[in-house]
Image (spheres, grey):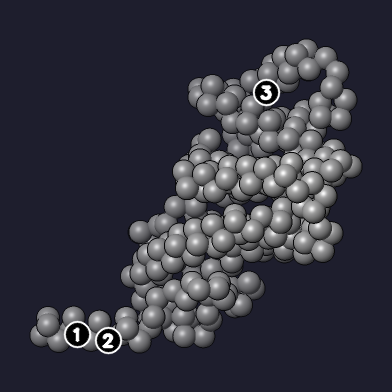
């Protein structure tokens, strides 16, 4: 790991620690923030320090909100607190993954906060539904069975996602790769021996579980439709790209391992082989 990447990771850790500290104690926030800026800029010493400053502030806010979510566990807003902490953890781990394995492409977008305007819309809609129904129905919204099931689903989904990111390493990218690189290899072991797309499966479980946790019947249906539409397009496009890159190796892998994502089967091999056969006949 090069020195610049080490400094970035150290700086990011400082910002996260700062957010956690302030969330616990709320003392002299401006002074601590000012001192941390000095430490942050001294550690980095890079030309684009303003960009890293913005990313550091984002890490600080996410860490702060992560802890605030835990405070809400002792209130009637326990479900929102769990979702808030889980969401912040999701953003931070995505950034840490890029910082660790793809430092040259590191940017504020690596948090995936702005990954999709549709995802942001669904997220805001689900929070709005939760608070609206909470104020309308009160304690009927707090159902322990759904809280337990939803929390377990969040943990499982997020664990699958994080495990996939850090075991795949340089082989995983937030953006679909269209060109073959020397360090790019086809993964077929570990979680990839169970599902062709463990990161998407983990994200799907996490997203749907969040709506079970918050007991959002409308948002659950909205999320289900949105996830199905997004993942079908994304998975099919990605698999077409992987077939071009790995050819028969990926086709054989597809025959052995399913996606295991509900209503997202991926490319239909029979139809793909028929279309390929027709194309070859036309070429002849």
Q: Which residue is mark 3?
A: 40
- Residue at the image position 44 percent from the left and 52 percent from the top: 175
Q: Determine whether 168 is above or below 195 in the image.
A: above
87 left or right of 280? right
Q: Which mark is residue 178?
A: none
Q: Residues within 10 Å of mark 1 (few under 14, many from 20)?
A: few
Q: Determine whether 248 is above or below 178 in the image.
A: below
Q: Residues within 10 Å of mark 2 (few under 14, many from 20)?
A: few
Asked where in the image residue 158 lies, by quadrant, the reply is bottom right
For the residues bearing labels 2 and 1, Cβ distance under 8 angstroms:
yes
In depth, the one of 14 and 94 nearer the eye is 94
Percent across and percent down for residue 180 are: 38, 61
- Of callouts 1 and 3, which one flags the residue occurring earlier in the amino acid sequence? 3
Asked where in the image residue 237 lies, by quadrant, the reply is bottom left
Q: Which residue is mark 1?
A: 278
Q: Determine whether 34 is above or below 40 in the image.
A: above
Quarter occupied by the C terminus: bottom left
Specify whether residue 284 is in view: yes
Specify whether residue 112 is in view: no
């Amino acid at each position: 790991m090069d020195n610049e990447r080490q400094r970035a990771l150290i700086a990011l850790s400082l910002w996260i620690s700062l957010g956690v500290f302030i969330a616990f104690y709320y003392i002299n926030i401006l002074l601590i923030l000012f001192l941390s800026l000095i430490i942050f800029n001294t550690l980095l010493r890079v030309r684009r320090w303003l960009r890293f400053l913005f990313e550091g502030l984002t890490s600080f806010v996410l860490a702060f909100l992560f802890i605030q979510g835990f405070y809400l566990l002792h209130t009637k807003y326990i479900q929102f607190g769990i979702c808030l902490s889980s969401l912040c953890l999701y953003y931070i781990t995505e950034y840490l993954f890029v910082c660790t394995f793809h430092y040259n492409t590191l940017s504020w977008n690596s948090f995936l906060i702005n990954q999709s305007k549709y995802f942001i819309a669904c997220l805001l809609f689900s929070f709005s539904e939760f608070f609206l129904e909470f104020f309308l129905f009160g304690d009927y919204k707090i159902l322990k069975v759904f809280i337990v099931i939803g929390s377990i689903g969040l943990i499982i989904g997020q664990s699958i996602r994080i495990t996939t990111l850090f075991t795949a390493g340089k082989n995983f990218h937030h953006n679909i790769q269209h060109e073959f690189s020397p360090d790019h290899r086809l993964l077929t072991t570990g979680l990839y021996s169970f599902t062709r797309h463990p990161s998407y499966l983990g994200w799907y479980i996490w997203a749907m579980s969040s709506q079970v946790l918050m007991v959002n019947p409308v948002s659950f249906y909205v999320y289900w439709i949105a996830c199905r539409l997004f993942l079908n397009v994304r998975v099919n496009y990605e698999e077409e790209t992987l077939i071009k890159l790995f050819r028969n190796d990926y086709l054989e892998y597809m025959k052995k391992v399913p996606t295991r994502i509900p209503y997202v089967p991926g490319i239909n091999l029979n139809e793909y082989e028929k279309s390929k056969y027709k194309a070859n006949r036309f070429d002849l």
